Amino acid sequence: MVDTAPTAPKVALPPVGEGPHRRRLGVLALVATLGGLLFGYDTGVINGALLPMQQELGLTDLTVGVVTSSLLFGAAVGAVLGGRIADGWGRRRTIVLLAVAFFVGTLTCVLAPTFGVMVVGRVLLGLAVGGASTVVPVFLAELAPYEIRGSLSGRNELMIVIGQLAAFVVNAVIGTLWGEGDGVWRVMLAVCALPAVALFVGMLRVPESPRWLASKGRYGEARAVLVQVRSEERATAELEAIERANEREAEARHGGGWRTLLGNGRLVRIVLVGSGIGVAQQLTGINSIMYYGQTVLVESGFQESAALIANIAPGVIAVVGGVVALANMERIDRRTTLVIGYSLTTVCHFLIGIASMTLVEGSPARPWVILVLVVAFVGSMQTFLNIATWVILSEIFPTQIRALGMGIAVFCLWTANAFLGLTFPTIVAATGITGTFFGFAAVGVLALLFIRRFVPESRGRTLEEVEQGLPTGDVSAVAAEQAQR
């Protein structure tokens, strides 16, 4: 159900208001989301760099899968490490560290003389990507007022797809100008160093998360940050609400980090739901399209050079879908958005499978029909699923384990992504496009059942109220109650 009025909070807060603090909030979000831009470019650039890299380094089908998935397995580890470091060391300093990792990983890949060095560089980039995918959404969610939290947090996912589109465009331009000459893929990879430097320099001037500061008892510093991005009245009222929430947590807390999580069944159940949300998103196959889009289009009938250019179309529609998603983020409930998204992507999967089965190879219509359906799938995914998934994950975990819980959920997300990235070429070779996309459709049906049964609603509520709304950890009961409203 579409609901244009957010749920009223339990404790009324003064309005966010307009003024310099809103502009300051936008600038801070822009700097932090450079991590999302790096995330997108590093995961998307392999799409066009892979074929010339394979030829120059003499990669086999197996080592191609290893090069692609090494970043993803690194990201799975980076998601947990990044969350743990951010809980103890702070969100801001962790993002600065990730900027350094992005830069070092990029240089390692650009200068890699052999397959082994390339894998090391990709793992370093994966650690940075995984850390950014955990810490940046948490930082934005903790910085944003609840009224615009979804649209502000969602900017990170928009920057991810902008980064992927930038990678596709850079690949197409460089591939067209230099063809398949030696080292062309190194130039494609080297572009990523520029936003890494910008992220490092920018984050040196960005303040720490006020909620993290408050969780460490540093309330004076937390208020100093809040007044940069809120009116004075709102900053004072919001800090009082945060203090009350922290006091309630302190009474129930025994230890911290993993000890707190594993000793509390309520928290374990919430983490399991978050992990399920992340895995379901990846098993749509969206990132297989982003990594192997050129391969899929060649398989459908395009020539390699034409596929490299046609691959820009999914990137463009992803950005358009992201803009639409941000516009609707504060108007449509999170659960409703996910249900619509999985319904549309599942239909697209079935149609791609049917088209590849009924349009024989060599048919002039086959590549164009499949391209249109792939674009429709990517558009549906980006408009209704990708941004909503990352926003929900940044909202549903309690403060004492927010970055850790996010890290575990994103670890599961990246692990699913990595295994899919590793096996996708083999699956396509064994079952063709038909079997591959019918498989994705079956997973989509299961995801719909999971979302309807277990995922709670978090739109229009402060992070403290979301936390209070799950007092027993029985998220299925909360989800069912909210679905009946």
Image (cartoon, rainbow, N blue to C red):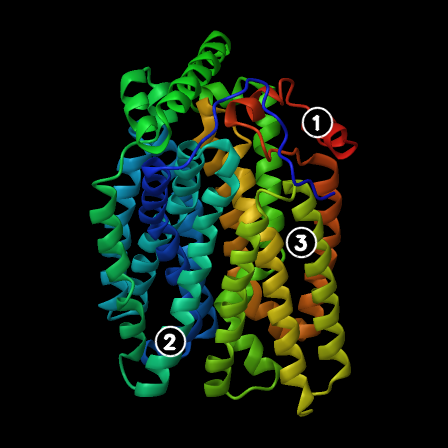
Q: Is residue 19 left or right of residue 9?
A: left
Of label 3 and label 1, which has the lower sequence position?
3
**In terms of depth relative to the viewer, which is nearer, 268 or 345?**
345
Of label 3 and label 2, which has the lower sequence position?
2
Q: Is residue 197 left or right of residue 256?
A: left
Element type where label 2 sits in the image = helix
Q: Amino acid at mark 1?
A: Val
Of label 1 and label 2, which has the lower sequence position?
2
Residue 445 x %, y %: 75, 53
Q: Amino acid at mark 3?
A: Gly
Find the distance from the CA under tag 3 to the CA under tag 1: 21 Å
Residue found 29% across the figure and 62% down from its top? 192
Q: Nearer the viewer, mark 3 or mark 2?
A: 3
Q: Is residue 315 left or right of residue 30?
A: right
Quadrant of the rendered structure where residue 442 is? bottom right
In the picture of the structure, the residue carrying the numbered disc 1 is 478
In the picture, the disc for residue 171 is 2
Residue found 41% across the figure and 75% down from its top? 48
Residue 55 visible in the displayed image: no
In the picture of the structure, the residue carrying the numbered disc 3 is 341
Q: Is residue 79 above or below residue 8?
A: below
Residue 253 x %, y %: 47, 12
The quarter of the rendered structure image containing the N terminus is top right
